[in-house]
Amino acid sequence: MYKGFMKILTLVFVSLLLNPLSAGIKKKFSADLLIPKNNYFMTGLKDDWIATDKGQHFLGSFMATGIATLSLKRFAGYSSSKSINIGVSFSLSLGLLKETYDGRNNWQRFSYKDLTADLLGTFLGYLVFR
């Protein structure tokens, strides 16, 4: 059962990684890049609460929490509490680093909405994988 579950998680994770690549190519050649960046946090790009991007952040954080937690439990021999703490920390760190990186680029911005989706995905991962 565990092997089947890990195969499904791996397939979902790979498909999640491939989808933003195609979105990134579309953004590079988008007319939205012509809008000047006013400050560190704002660009002319829309940032809706209900968007594909938020689902990707939610699912990515959930899977990062789960993969890190299960890997530490299964392969490194950590206790349940220690592995979930490291898994949650890892997932939140990834989300925060990504948003910080986005805020430094001209074609993206720091998004509190993305960070909220990361937090919710990590919380669900905590509930499921603890």
Image: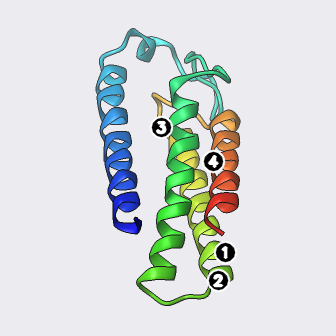
Residue indicated by mark 4: 121
The x, y position of residue 25, in whole percent, is: 29, 26
Dots 1, 4 in contact, CB < 8 A: no
The earlier-in-sequence mark between 1 and 3 is 1
The earlier-in-sequence mark between 3 and 4 is 3
> What is the spatial separation of the Cα atoms under label 2 and label 1, in whole angstroms?
5 Å
Secondary structure at badge 3 equals: loop
Residue indicated by mark 2: 82
Residue indicated by mark 1: 85
The amino acid type, in three-letter code, at marker 2 is Lys
Q: Residue furthest top?
A: 31
> What is the spatial separation of the Cα atoms under label 3 and label 2, in whole angstroms?
35 Å
Q: Which of these two is toward me, 36 or 46?
A: 46
State which quadrant residue 75 falls in.
bottom left
Quarter of the image that includes the N terminus = bottom left
> What is the spatial separation of the Cα atoms under label 1 and label 4, in whole angstroms?
15 Å
Dots 1, 3 in contact, CB < 8 A: no
The amino acid type, in three-letter code, at marker 3 is Asn
Residue indicated by mark 3: 105
Q: Which of these two is toward me, 51 or 24?
A: 51
The x, y position of residue 63, in whole percent, is: 50, 54
Q: Which of these two is toward me, 30 or 39?
A: 30
> What is the spatial separation of the Cα atoms under label 1 and label 3, in whole angstroms?
31 Å
> What is the spatial separation of the Cα atoms under label 4 and label 2, in whole angstroms?
19 Å
The structure residue drawn at horizontal position 64% and vertical position 20%, both measured from the top left corner, is 48
Q: Does 64 sit above or below residue 54?
A: below
Secondary structure at badge 2 equals: helix
Secondary structure at badge 4 equals: helix
Q: How would you rate the neighbour count of disc 2 (Cα within 10 Å): few for under 14, some for 14-19, many for 20 or more?
A: few
Q: How would you rate the neighbour count of disc 1 (Cα within 10 Å): few for under 14, some for 14-19, many for 20 or more?
A: some
Dots 3, 2 in contact, CB < 8 A: no
The structure residue drawn at horizontal position 40% and vertical position 58%, both measured from the top left corner, is 5
